[in-house]
Image (spheres, rainbow, N blue to C red):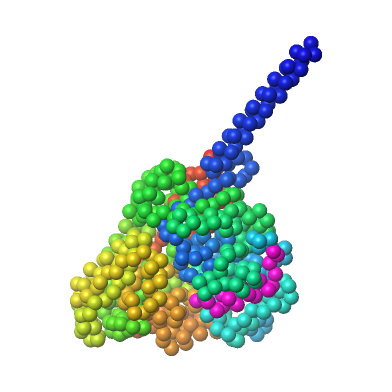
């Protein structure tokens, strides 16, 4: 009897162990496939991006892929809410002096870097002063300096009042990522050698041309406020994120169909209509910014203002944008330097010089210019198919009015490198994200592609910074956009456009705000 009872108990124990092992195996299998295990977390999220970022050091690059990946790793003193207003992030509160020359940032306490060190004022000061030195946004705050008040207080001291200083700091392009002081101090000319921030994900591995692996930061300290744009509470529900570098659109498309990818940041515009028909996918267009034609104003024929206006008169934006973006959902014919969603700043001044499609006017201006038929180099890449297609149509339009255009094709990282050298190009089409304030427009910055330089631009940008209210600032901006189109012509706006992010039906709570982010995103079955 005792033996029989012992055998029954033993059998039950064995059965329970087998069931437990089966359940454990099933959970491991689910986690390996990125499935929700009931804990609210998923093991793996796979995101496809079309090109490799040049760096993950945000102040070093204006590349959108740098921002898309790095914003999950690094945070900033202030950031943008969904209304494009600057609000505190690593700062807890911000005070402004009566003379508008000093901003005091009271830091959140207990915030940890990914190496376990607490963030304090010396880290913020080192990071922000580096940003001032090397970024386009930082250089807008000429003469500014960040100083330590105490371990949890940082002071920004300005030489003159700057009305939009917090907007400049909150911009998501070349953003001022906060890093440990020792990382900043050992940064090389090419950037930092370690990617350590305070964000909800930490850098794990970068296999060149294959993937970038981020990992959930278990000790992340979130803001106690509702999620709102880039601001508010951030929570990582995914243990491992892989940004897969997949240049081929057909491979990306097939990966969506098979479930190899959960999120795709770059889909071919040719595939947009087909993607709309797939009920298992969510297509998420988000307004990105402007497609622009940059002129090399430092060397070559485009230094001649008449020549630039001749090119601008020849441009048919309808044909260029249709070639680049295919579907009417994805582009808009509009002349604004600041796009319509930036409601405080949008202007249509100078619109009569946009999308003229006037070959005869172009030929007349060309005769009045110094152009003598020499080859004009149009720098482009097939890594972004919309840029390449737009470049091909522009080449045709310019050749029709007598401009000898040579299309030079490279991969995108090479284009980014070559366009820094004024001896290597004359024209270049690229997309630029719309900033929060006109002060941050890259194509009005001396150091950016094309090297714009004119005292009138300086005067009107200074007027925006010195303005006492939005009405005064907007009047300066209206005048500047009019001057840019009618006179100096630093660039030609080709149109406004949206990018498309596609997610599978397993992805929930993903926000495509300004190109998307992965905190608060979940995977479900």
Q: Is residue 124 left or right of residue 510?
A: right
Q: Residue at x 66, y 57 (%)?
A: 220
Residue 413, compared with residue 368, is above or below; it is above
Residue 443, picture quadrant: bottom left
Q: Residue at x 68, y 73 (%)?
A: 122
Q: Main secondary structure of the magenta part?
A: helix
Q: Is residue 270 rendered magenta in the image? A: no
Residue 420: tell me if it is visible. yes
The residue at the far right in this view is 2
Q: Is residue 108 left or right of residue 472?
A: right
Task: Provide the residue span drawn in magenta.
Answer: 117-137
Q: Is residue 94 left or right of residue 52?
A: right
Of residue 86 and residue 149, the one placed in the foreground of this image is 149
The residue at the far bottom in this view is 455
Residue 371, picture quadrant: bottom left
Task: Tell me where residue 199 appears, x and y as whole percent.
Answer: 61, 60
Task: Tell me where residue 135 appears, x and y as whole percent.
Answer: 52, 75
Residue 409, picture quadrant: bottom left
Task: Tell me where residue 432 appears, x and y as whole percent.
Answer: 42, 69
Task: Tell me where residue 159 appears, x and y as whole percent.
Answer: 60, 86
Q: Residue at x 52, y 49 (%)?
A: 45
Residue 82, compared with residue 41, is above or below; it is below
Q: Is residue 133 rendered magenta in the image? A: yes
Residue 343: tell me if it is visible. no
């Amino acid at each position: 009897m005792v033996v029989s009872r012992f055998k029954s108990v033993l059998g039950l124990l064995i059965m329970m162990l087998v069931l437990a092992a089966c359940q454990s195996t099933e959970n491991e299998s689910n986690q390996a496939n990125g499935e929700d295990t009931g804990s609210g977390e998923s093991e793996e999220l796979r995101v496809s991006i079309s090109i490799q970022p040049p760096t993950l050091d945000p102040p070093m690059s204006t590349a959108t892929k740098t921002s898309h990946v790095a914003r999950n790793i690094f945070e900033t003193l202030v950031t943008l809410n969904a209304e494009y207003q600057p609000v505190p992030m690593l700062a807890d509160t911000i005070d402004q002096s009566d003379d508008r020359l000093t901003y005091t940032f009271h830091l959140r306490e207990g915030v940890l870097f990914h190496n376990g060190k607490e963030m304090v004022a010396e880290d913020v000061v080192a990071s922000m002063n580096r940003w001032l030195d090397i970024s386009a946004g930082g250089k807008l705050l000429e003469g500014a300096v960040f100083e330590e008040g105490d371990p949890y207080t940082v002071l920004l001291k300005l030489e003159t009042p700057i009305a939009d200083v917090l907007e400049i700091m909150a911009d998501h392009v070349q953003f001022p990522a906060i890093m440990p002081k020792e990382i900043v101090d050992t940064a090389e000319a090419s950037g930092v050698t370690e990617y350590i921030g305070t964000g909800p994900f930490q850098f794990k591995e970068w296999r060149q041309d294959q993937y970038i692996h981020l990992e959930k930061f278990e000790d992340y300290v979130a803001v106690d406020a509702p999620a709102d744009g880039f601001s508010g509470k951030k929570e990582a529900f995914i243990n491992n994120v892989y940004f897969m570098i997949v240049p081929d659109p057909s491979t990306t498309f097939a990966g969506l169909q098979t479930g190899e990818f959960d999120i795709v940041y770059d889909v071919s515009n040719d595939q947009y209509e087909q993607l709309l028909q797939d009920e298992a996918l969510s297509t998420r267009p988000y307004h990105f910014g402007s497609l622009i034609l940059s002129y090399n104003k430092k060397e070559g024929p485009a230094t001649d203002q008449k020549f630039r206006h001749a090119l601008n008169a020849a441009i048919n934006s309808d044909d260029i944008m249709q070639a680049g973006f295919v579907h009417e959902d994805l582009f808009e014919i509009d002349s604004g330097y600041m796009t319509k969603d930036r409601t405080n700043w949008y202007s249509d001044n100078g619109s009569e010089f946009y999308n003229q499609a006037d070959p005869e006017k172009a030929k007349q201006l060309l005769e009045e210019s110094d152009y003598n038929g020499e080859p004009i180099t149009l720098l482009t890449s097939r890594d972004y198919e919309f840029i390449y297609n737009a470049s091909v149509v522009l080449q045709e339009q310019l050749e029709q009015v007598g401009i000898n255009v040579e299309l030079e094709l490279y991969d995108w990282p090479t284009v980014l490198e070559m366009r820094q050298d004024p001896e290597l190009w004359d024209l270049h089409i690229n997309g630029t994200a719309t900033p929060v304030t006109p002060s941050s427009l890259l194509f009005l910055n001396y150091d950016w592609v094309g090297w714009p330089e004119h005292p009138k631009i300086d005067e009107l940008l200074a007027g925006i910074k010195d303005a006492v209210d939005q009405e005064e600032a907007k009047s300066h901006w209206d005048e500047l956009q009019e001057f840019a189109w009618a006179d100096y012509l630093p660039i030609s706006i080709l149109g406004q456009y949206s990018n498309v992010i596609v997610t599978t039906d397993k992805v929930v709570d993903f926000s495509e705000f300004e190109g998307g982010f992965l905190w608060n995103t979940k995977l479900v079955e």
